[in-house]
Amino acid sequence: MQTTLEKPATEKKVEKTEAGNYFVSNYPPFSFWKPDQVHLVDEVLQRPAPPDIPLGVYFHIPFCRKRCHFCYFKVYTDKNAGEIKAYIDAGMREMERLAARPYLKGRKAHFVYFGGGTPSYLSVPQLKDLSERMKALVPWDEAEEVAFEAEPGTLNEVKLTGIREIGVTRLSLGVENFDDHILESNGRAHRSGEIGKAYNFARGLGFEHINIDLIAGMMNETEANWKVCVAKAIEMQPDAVTIYQMEVPYNTTMYQQMKAEGKVTAPVADWQTKRDWVSHAFDEFQKAGYTVTSAYTVVKDPKRIKFVYRDSLWDGADLLSCGVASFGHFGGVHYQNQADVGPYMQAVDAGKPPIFRAYQTTHEDRFVREFILKLKLGRSEWAHYIQKFGEDPRKHFGPQLDYLAKEGFATLDADGITLTRDGLLQVDRLLHDFFLPQHRQYARYT
Ligand code: SF4
């Protein structure tokens, strides 16, 4: 959820990391999604299936071994096998009801995503049962990608073999850091020794796309250690690396600790330092032959390695999303499920949709959404928006684009916009200026 927009770097020398998050994962912001729009999801589901919109399937697994101090998701660390089975049963009942609706009936998955939480927390029999039931409801035989998030400490050869056998093509390892003290002090469940083992097993099993996640600016991170992390990641030669800059949202244990101690500044690096660390990583990966493909990603072979889930959603694909707190989208209506497992399971048991808020987008919302999300890729062509939406970003966003160019965050040419490295590294902060006035909390251009 978006909060305030900080002043530009040029106006503020040291930007301490304070509580809040700037990361733009969707648009309009979640705070504008409302319970009184939930009925609109049902209206879309009564329509006939569209012939030309790709469909993704998402299943949310809210279980983790341990809660990380920076985690802002609702996760459960104490569920037994019976409770996990009941949760999967509820999720499949939810999916069964949705898949039978006219808008979804007979459609196949173009992409599949297992997110969490920690999907790899499930046992192989649980994963097999879950995936077989999902495939029976929405076939995956034409899926271009089946993506799966994994925590290194939950993986061994048997688990990874099971994950491969259910059809996963993109395995994403939540490595975050290679230093045991940093992993421990940030509340991560895994340790460095488990990373290499999991990665080597996975490589041996032939996953098409292995991504590793890193976080720049974890608590106790140092420049020297960060450089070692980058070097170790390069040595592993993953297909892609995703690098996040540490944020401290309000609903984290790290924020609770700050509040208890009366601190405003989080015990992590300031924003400029985090940007410098990501920039160093980008430079090193580029030297090793990787390409920077977004504000967070480097890819070894961009012709072969795609991230279908991300790109499809940014293009406006439908997403049949099930499980607690999950986010979905049908024909221009976004929705989110109940965020706690109790109300979620009660709704499913009662035969009701477990959705608690939704948002019907306008044509203008969809144009703005796609433009801002794709700016994260670092390059956008005007013609794409003129053809797809009949809207020219130069007319819509004149002052915002001039500002980016004037501050050295982007260059504009006759065909489109290219973010500079400086712009790319703080794109989430800059994107708030492109929100429609009714969705802004910090208005530089009214
Ligand atoms: S593994 Fe991920 S979802 Fe689980 S507690 Fe840590 S950050 Fe949160």
Image (spheres, grey):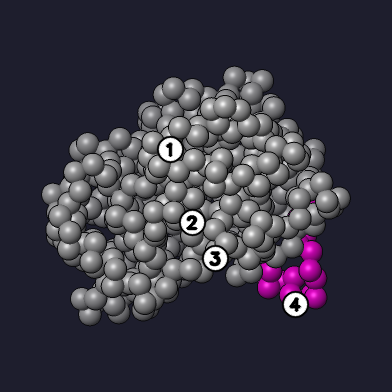
Question: Which residue is under mark 3?
Answer: 438
Dot 1: element? helix
Q: Nearer the viewer, mark 1 or mark 2?
A: 1
Magenta stretch encompasses residue 256: yes
**Magenta span of residues:** 254-270
Whichever of callouts 3 and 2 sits on the residue coming sooner in the sequence is 2
Q: Nearer the viewer, mark 4 or mark 1?
A: 1
Callouts 1 and 3 close, C-beta under 8 Å: no
Q: Nearer the viewer, mark 4 or mark 3?
A: 3
Q: Position of residue 129 (x, y in %)?
A: 23, 54
CA separation in Å, label 4 and label 1: 51 Å
Q: Residue at x 64, y 23 (%)?
A: 286
Circle on res. 27: 2
Magenta stretch encompasses residue 117: no
Q: Residue at x 22, y 80 (%)?
A: 350
Whichever of callouts 1 and 3 sits on the residue coming sooner in the sequence is 1
Identified by mark 3, the residue type is Gln
Whichever of callouts 4 and 3 sits on the residue coming sooner in the sequence is 4
Identified by mark 2, the residue type is Tyr
Q: Position of residue 53 (x, y in %)?
A: 27, 44
Q: Quadrant of the N terminus?
A: bottom right
Callouts 4 and 2 close, C-beta under 8 Å: no
